[in-house]
Image: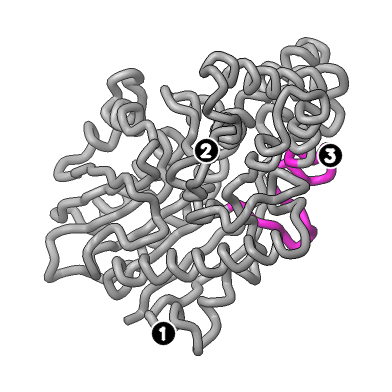
Amino acid sequence: MTVRTSKSTYATVSMKGGGYYSQRTRGAKDVIDNAVSMLEDAVAALPARTTERSIQIADYGAADGGTSKQAIYRTISALRKRYPQHQVTVTYSDLPGNDYSTLFRNLTGVDDDSDDNYLKDFGNVFVNACGIGFHSQLMPDQTLDIGFSATAMHYVSEKPCQIPNHVHMVGASGSALDAFSRQARDDWNRILLSRAAELKPGGRLVFMNFGIDEDGRYLGNTGGINMLNTFNDIWHELHEEGSITHDEWVDATFSQFYRTREEFCAPLVDPSSEVYQSGLRLVSAHTGVVKCPYRAAYEAAGETMSTQEFAASYIPTLRSWSETVFATALDSARPEGARAALVDLFYQRYADRVAADPTGHAMDYVHCYLAIEKIL
């Protein structure tokens, strides 16, 4: 057995590249598009900035930039109306293994000369990227005006442990759940303190993150088939039949934690917290559900879409963000082709379940939407 020693999220997580992520995560784009008004409100709330000549915005956890492209365009459009002479810099942040080539191809329109290309439509706009995640400070003190993040900050900086009986913290209990809870709490404080250092006084943060809502719903668990339980069932099935080892089964632990609204808000409303004392204040917080677009398309199609066609359209959106978890859990001593075949088999098993009975299969998005300001 080849031992994997790194628990760092940097070493084990990336979105599927080559444009696969944004092309197959329409729901993530819907979440962002539905919250563009929060970004426009953030622009309207900024101070006059009369003594400055530049505005800085950041997209934390940007992946290939496709899902946030329209939202960033509209944010820059709003900034141009308020600050017609200011230079605007956009910083895209993600993990070292992110597909930055596709990100810049999306931004420049190399592969898709569509609308929402702010580099063509607005002057004095500059773009850069940062490949060290978002759990630490990325920009100099008091240089950021608007920080934005969508569907990203549920990733913890490292796995505190492997979960012995499930692939995700939603199925964890006891000491494993306690360890993930502590890690998530510490990471959230670090994230907020890092953003507090970066923000100018009067700056704003707009975050929309996966979470658990007031009814106990979370991604892929809104009343139908539980997606994460299905992941676990199929991965365990491969272990039971001898296709993967016990260690490989356990090592497929997602570096994620779904916080509640209360957990998101706690350090922002407690005057004794370091986050509150850094000057960050909660402006608003609410949860919301965005329906799975692939399920909606299947239901709208009626008899014109087969269950097999629905499965073929649905599974890629699950695979776009989860594949590396299962791929990196496999023993690196296995030949690369054998590992790829096992990952393909895993998702084929899921597709077979959906095709056999699509009832209840959907990846509805459950988010907590936060608006935060810095008052100091």
Residue in view at x 49 percent, y 40 percent: 13
Number of numbered discs on residues: 3
Dot 2 crowding, Cα within 10 Å, few <14, some 14–19, many 20+: many
| 2 or 3: tag closer to the N-terminus | 2
Q: Nearer the viewer, mark 2 or mark 3?
A: 3
Instruction: Determine the secondary structure under disc 2.
Output: helix
Residue in view at x 30 percent, y 54 percent: 57
Q: Is residue 244 above or below residue 67?
A: above
What's under tag 3, amino acid-wise?
Answer: Gly
Residue in view at x 31 percent, y 71 percent: 197
Helix, strand or loop for the magenta stretch, by majority: loop
Q: Nearer the viewer, residue 275 or 109?
A: 275
Q: Could you tell me which quadrant the C terminus lies in?
A: bottom left
Based on the picture, tell me whether residue 343 belongs to the magenta stretch: no
In percent of width and height, residue 63 lies at: 42, 38
Instruction: Determine the secondary structure under disc 3.
Output: loop
Query: Which dot marks residue 29?
Result: 2
Residue topped by disc 1: 277
Name the side, left or right, on which 207 lies relative to 145: right
Q: Nearer the viewer, residue 271 or 132?
A: 132
Dot 1 crowding, Cα within 10 Å, few <14, some 14–19, many 20+: some
In percent of width and height, residue 156 lies at: 53, 55
What's under tag 1, amino acid-wise?
Answer: Gln
Instruction: Determine the secondary structure under disc 1.
Output: helix
Residue in view at x 87 percent, y 22 percent: 357
Question: Disc 2 to disc 3, how far (Cα)?
Answer: 22 Å
**Which contiguous range is marked in magenta?**
210-228
Residue topped by disc 3: 224
Based on the picture, tell me whether residue 211 belongs to the magenta stretch: yes
